[in-house]
Every structure is written in structure tokens, then in C-alpha cells.
Amino acid sequence: MQERFNDQNKRITEFQTEVLVVCPSCGQKAMASVDYGKERARLLCTQCSYNKENTTESTVLGIKGHWQMAAHQYFNAKLWLQQPFKNEVFWAYNEQHLAYLESYIGATLREHKDRSHFTLLEKLPKFYHEAKNRAALLKLIDKLKQLSAKS
């Protein structure tokens, strides 16, 4: 466990272009990725060779367009890195997202610079911030890291 966390003011969008998901074909770990410039999303499983490509065009709240969503949403795919926690769900898009959350949760001193109310940490549910959940969340994060490394 580290003592100090320096907030890098990261936003959730920094982690959403490559998302670990459950393969819809074999149930193993797969990767959903999106290229907003090319307006294409792909879901690829290295276990069973499942490969699907979609456009980023979607209808959100009745408006059709090329929305910049998290990669897994173009396929309605389930996140690989998620686990129930009390009456909530703890989740991360990928290993980098999980590592960022781990460094925040594990720190006893959390330093924040000029937040803008749009950072990832400001949008987290309350249970991520509470010291009473620190040990249990770090244990859960270790479980997710092992799950991710296995497959």
C-alpha cells in the first residue's frame, strides 16, 4: 500500500478506447477497441478467434450519430474486470484503469490539484473513497488482476 496519491486529473475517457470484455462466443477475456477517427469499433478474442467489427454510429436519447462511447458499448459486451462489492459493482475498463484506481484506493494521503469536476475520481461512487472499504477493495483489485493475468 502506498502512502501518497497525486491526482493526475484523469478522465474516464482516457481508458475507454480499449476495454477488456467477456467474449460473447467463448466467455473468455477479449478486447473491445474503438477508433473514433475511423468511426469503427472491433471486438477480438484471442482464445476463440471471435472477431466482430461495428460502426460507431448509434442512437442515444433518440439522436443518431457517431458517439464516443466506451468500446464495449458498441457490442453490448460485459466488462471482464467487474466484481460485486456489497450492494454495488466495482469495475475497470482495462489494466491501466485498474492500476489507477488501485493507486488511489491504496493511498492514505490523497493529493488533488485543480480539479474541474469532470475527473474520473470525482465521478466515482462514494464507496471507492471510503477508508473503511480500502482493505476489501484492494483485495478485490488483486482478485481482478489475477483474473486478467490468467486469461
Image (cartoon, grey):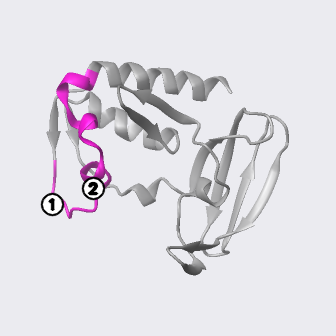
- Disc assigned to residue 114: 1
Callout 2: 10 Å neighbours few (<14), some, many (20+)?
Answer: some
Q: Residue at coordinates 72% horizontally, 52% vertically from top-left? A: 43
Q: Amino acid at mark 1?
A: Asp
Task: Specify the quadrant that holds the N terminus.
Answer: top left
Q: Amino acid at mark 2?
A: Asn
Q: Residue at coordinates 57% horizontally, 41% vertically from top-left? A: 79
57 shown above or below 97: below
Outermost residue toward the front?
62
| Residue segment shown in magenta | 112-134
Q: Position of residue 102 (x, y in %)?
A: 35, 32
Within the image, what quadrant is residue 27 found in? top right
Outermost residue toward the right?
49
Q: Are marks 2 and 1 in contact (CB under 8 Å)?
A: yes
Looking at marks 2 and 1 on the same chain, the residue that comes earlier in the sequence is marked by 2
74 shown above or below 109: below
**Along the line of sight, the residue nearer the viewer: 64 or 2:** 64
* Residue at numbered disc 2: 9
11 shown above or below 83: below
Q: Position of residue 127 (x, y in %)?
A: 26, 34
Task: Specify the quadrant that holds the C terminus.
Answer: top right
Q: Position of residue 105 (x, y in %)?
A: 28, 32
